Image (tube, rainbow, N blue to C red):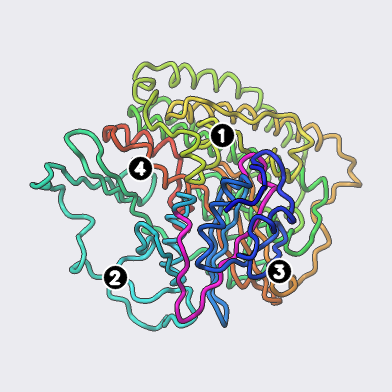
Amino acid sequence: MSTGIETQSDAETGEAELEALIGDRALARDEHLNAPGFVVNPDDVQDVLFDLRDEAGYDHCSCVTAQQYEDRFETIYHLKKYADPTDEVSIVVPTPLSDPVSKSAEPVYRTADWHEREAYDLVGIGYEGHPDLRRILLPETWQGHPLSADYDQEKPQVVTLTEHANPLESDHRDPESDTMFLNVGPHHPATHGVLHVKTVLDGETIADLEPDIGYLHRCEEQMCQQGTYRHQIMPYPDRWDYVSSGLLNEWAYARAIEDLADIDVPEYAQIVRTLGAELCRIASHMLALGTFALDVYGEFTATFMYTFRDRELVQDILEDLTGQRMMFNYFRVGGVAWDLPEPREDFFEQTRDFLDELPAKVAEYNDLITTNEIFQTRCIDTGVLEPDVAKDYGCTGPVARGSGVDYDLRRDDPYGYYENLEWDVVTRDGCDNYARVLCRMEEVEESAKIVEQCLDLLEDWPEDDREVQANVPRTLKPDADTETYRAVEAAKGELGIYMRSDGTDKPARFKIRSPCFSNLQALGEMSEGEYIPDLIASLGSLDIVLGEVDR
C-alpha cells in the first residue's frame, strides 16, 4: 500500500499522518492516555502493522494485551519506536465472541509469537497464520481459557501426560535423523529458576531449542485485578522480579496508576524514588554478575561471594530506607511511604561509604572476570544477538544495549528525576555474552553517579519542603474505559503495565509487560549452532527471573 508517507524512525508521527497511513482500514478511534488508538478489522491487522513498521518506523512491539468485553474479544498491540519510545500508537483488534480469530502479528514482529500464545492460552483468542499457536503458561491438557467469561472455575482439571510427550523423559536419540533430544531443567541451578529448555542436538551443536515456561505462573495479573488501586496492588510488584528489583517493579505500577488517575508526585518524593530505584539496579546487576560467573566457569568462592557481599551492603541501605530487605512495599500512589530514616546523617554516611568503595570493587571484578582468559573464551563471540534481531524480539535493557541498541526509558521517556541528573546510557557493540556483562558492570557505575547526585539534593533540601506524598483520595475510581500503558526502565529492561478502568476502585484489566518474557524469546536465536555450555552462558547473560517471566 503506497501512502506517500516517508519512513519516520527518528521523527514523531502525527495523528493525521497515522490516519492517512491506516486509511479506511480503521473502523474507529480508541484513545489511550499514552497513545492514539485505532480500531482495525481483524483481517487487516497484519497489513496495518507492516505499514506502521516499514513506513512509519514503529519497530518496537512492546506489549500485546488481550481481554474480553461483554460483546467482544479484543487484542491491543502497543507499538513504539526504539528511536523515540514516546511516539506510541495502539492498534486495537476486536473479534466477535462467536469466532475470536484475527490475523497474527508474528510475521511483522517476531516477539508477538509468545505474546499471542499467552493471549490464546489465557483469554482464548486465535491468531490466523501464527507459526505455533498452543498454550504457553498452562499445560497442553488444560481445559478452557481462565480469563474468558465462560470459564468454569469449579471444573476440576486433570493434567495428564499420556496424550503428549513427557517433557521429563530420559534423553533419547532420534534414529531417523541422528539427533539427540536433551532436557535442560526445569530444576537446574543454571536455569535461574524453574525453566525447562527443550534442546535438540546434532552431534555436539544445538540444532533446535525451545524454552518451556509456566512452571512459576502465579496469576499475578489476576490478583492485581482483584485489588484496589489505592492500597492493595502495590505489595504485588515486589514479587515479580523478586531478587533485588522491588522498587523498580513498584515504580512501574506507580507510573501507570498515577497516569490513569492524573496524580502529580512531589519533586522531593521523585528524588527519593530515583535514589531507591538505582540502589535496586546496583543490587540486581551485582546478583546477575555473580550468578553469571558461577554459570560460566564455576567461580563460587571469589566472584559469587564477593558480589553477594556487595549486594548485601545495598540491601542494608534499602532496609534502612524501606523497612524490608526484599519485599519493600515502599512506594505509594503519589509518592513514597515515608521520608529517609533518622538520623539522616547516618543514612547519608552509610550510603556514601558504599559509593566510595564501589570503584575499587568494580576494578576488582574486572580483574577477576573480564580479563580472565577462561571467561573471555566462554563469552566472546558466543550468544550473538544482532541489533535487528534484538529489536524484532522486543528485547530491552542490557540485553538490547549490549547489542548496540541505544534505548533506555529513563532518558528516552523521562520519569522520576532522571532528566535533571547527569549520567550516561551504556551501550556495547559486541552483541555477545561478553558485551552484556560489560554493559551491566558499567551501568553499576552510572547508577552510582545517579545515587550520589540524589544524596546531594536530599542533603540540601529544605526541611519544610520535604513532601513525600501527593494528596491522593482515599478511594481511587478513574473514569470508566480509561486506558493507559506506562513503562519504566527496570534492571532487566522495559517493565510496563497496561490498565483499563471500569469506573470502580479496581482495574478491569491489568497486564504486565515483562522484559524477561520478551528477552527470553531470543534464546533460540542466540544458541542455535552453538554448544550446550554456550547455551548456559547465553541464558545467564539474559539475566532472567522466572517469577517475572511467568507472572
Cβ atoms under marks 1 and 2 closer than 8 Å: no
Q: Give the mark nearest the N terminus, 3 or 4.
A: 3
Judge depth for marks 4 and 2 and give the one in front: 4
Query: Mark 4, residues whose alpha carbon is within 10 Å: few (<14), some, or many (≥20)?
Result: many
> Residue 385, how many percent across, how many down?
43, 34
> Residue 468, how many percent across, how many down?
80, 52
Write the start and end of the magenta stretch as one range.
Answer: 81-106
Q: Is residue 324 left or right of residue 291?
A: right
The structure residue drawn at horizontal position 81% and vertical position 55%, both measured from the top left corner, is: 264
- Residue furthest to the left in view is 175
The three-letter amino acid code for the residue at tag 1 is: Val
The three-letter amino acid code for the residue at tag 2 is: Thr
- Dot label at residue 141: 2
> Residue 149, how many percent across, how many down?
49, 80
> Residue 139, how many percent across, how many down?
32, 65
Q: Nearer the viewer, residue 135 or 551?
A: 135
Q: Give the mark nearest the N terminus, 1 or 3.
A: 1
Q: Nearer the viewer, residue 295 or 46?
A: 46
- The residues bearing labels 1 and 2 have C-alpha atoms spaced at a distance of 40 Å
Judging by the rendered image, the residue that carries numbered circle 1 is: 405
Q: Nearer the viewer, residue 536 or 524?
A: 524
Label 1, secondary structure: give it.
loop
- The residues bearing labels 1 and 4 have C-alpha atoms spaced at a distance of 19 Å
Judging by the rendered image, the residue that carries numbered circle 4 is: 524
Q: Give the mark nearest the N terminus, 4 or 2.
A: 2
Q: Give the mark nearest the N terminus, 1 or 2.
A: 2
Query: Mark 3, residues whose alpha carbon is within 10 Å: few (<14), some, or many (≥20)?
Result: some
Judging by the rendered image, the residue that carries numbered circle 3 is: 482
The three-letter amino acid code for the residue at tag 4 is: Gly
